[in-house]
Amino acid sequence: MKKTAFFIGVMAALCTIGCQSHKEEKEEERTFLVMNPIEKDTTITKEYVSQIHSVRHIELRALEKGYLQKINVDEGQKVRQGQTMFQIMPNIYQAELQKAKAEGNSASIEYDNTKLLANNKVVSANELALSKAKLDKAKAEIMLAQTHLGFTTVKAPFDGIMDHLHVREGSMVEEGELLTTLSDNSKMWVYFNVPEAEYLNYAMTAPQGKKQEVALLMANNQKFDQKGTVETIEGEFNNETGNIAFRATFSNPKGILRHGETGSVVMTIPLKNALLIPQKSSFEVLGKRFVFVVDKNNVVHQREIEVAAELPHLFAIKKGLTTSDRVLIEGIRLVKDNEKIHVKSENGKSVFASLDVYAE
């Protein structure tokens, strides 16, 4: 019985040792996938926080002092060019116009009489000239009175949407007092700031004579249904921020956008001969990014890289790699620097396809 137990124990020990050896052999035989970075032209998208402005946004102010007799519009209302919006009591200005017209008639009669006398050599040419000057002054007074009377009616200078009312009917308004604001939202100007380096990339790669097309991501994280174009770039950089302001123009046929909204401009930027690797093949240590490169003897070496741009699931590499390097694309937590491993090369296109992304 003792011999049998001893035999079973020995067999169990041998089996355990054999299993462990087999397991270690399996671990040593693990194969890691590597790939060469792919070099190709691609594009990236950048988002810039933006401010949305109406193409025309003005303040409507009283041009004359007086009682606000009538408000013909309401807040948020669409108005047409030439539509009467506010009426200031015109009585005083109507009286002034009548007075100016009466003085004008008197000056006209006086001039006609003086002219008749001048023709008969009764009065001098200088006296006729003085009478003519008096008549011209009276006509100017009539035009001035008509202008003041016209200012009592405030009309819409263009089609637009009216904003908040700052006065109410019956208010005493002063000359220059704010009545409301008016916005032409048929087109919108969207302003956004671009860092100096990205501006230079844009300026050096943008096709000559062709305007850059951009998209607008609204505050609800939905894309606006119209495309915009970059129309202007300001002439100077902001020395405090290192940015320069771009302005894109968007059509707004449905009136969705309003003055003062915010959003993000989405710009597509081309990258020439970009060197691409999967993001998952890299790791970060103390703010620096690294990959594992496998040499011709299948020895792993940790190498620092510099990322030029980030794409979905991919990095475009600025510095640290070439197309001849073999980069470890999986199992980066299972290897150590200077460790020899078994590798299998994968085609870069198939690796990118497995990420559900491929840079066109």
Image (tube, grey):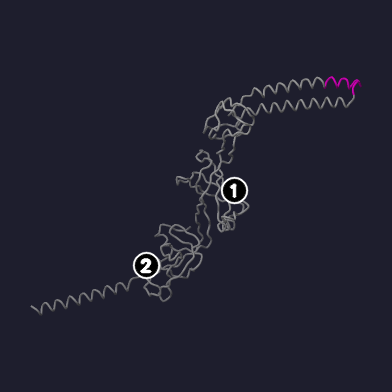
Say which amino acid is labelled 2: Arg
User: Residue under circle 2?
Assistant: 333
Residue 290 position, x and y percent, is 44, 67
Circle 2: is it few (<14), some (14-19), or many (20+) Cα within 10 Å? few
User: Residue 310: x and y, percent?
Assistant: 47, 59
Separation of residues labelled 1 and 2 (CA atoms): 49 Å
Q: Which mark is residue 337?
A: none
- Is 315 located above or below residue 104 in the figure? below
Q: State the SS at label 2.
A: loop
Residue 75 x %, y %: 52, 32
Q: Label 1 sits on what residue type?
A: Glu
Quadrant holding the N terminus: bottom left
Residue under circle 1?
A: 231
Q: Is residue 112 above or below residue 186?
A: above
> Is disc 1 surrounded by few (<14), some (14 to 19) or many (20+) residues within 10 Å?
few
Q: Main secondary structure of the magenta part?
A: helix
In x, y percent, where is residue 164?
53, 34
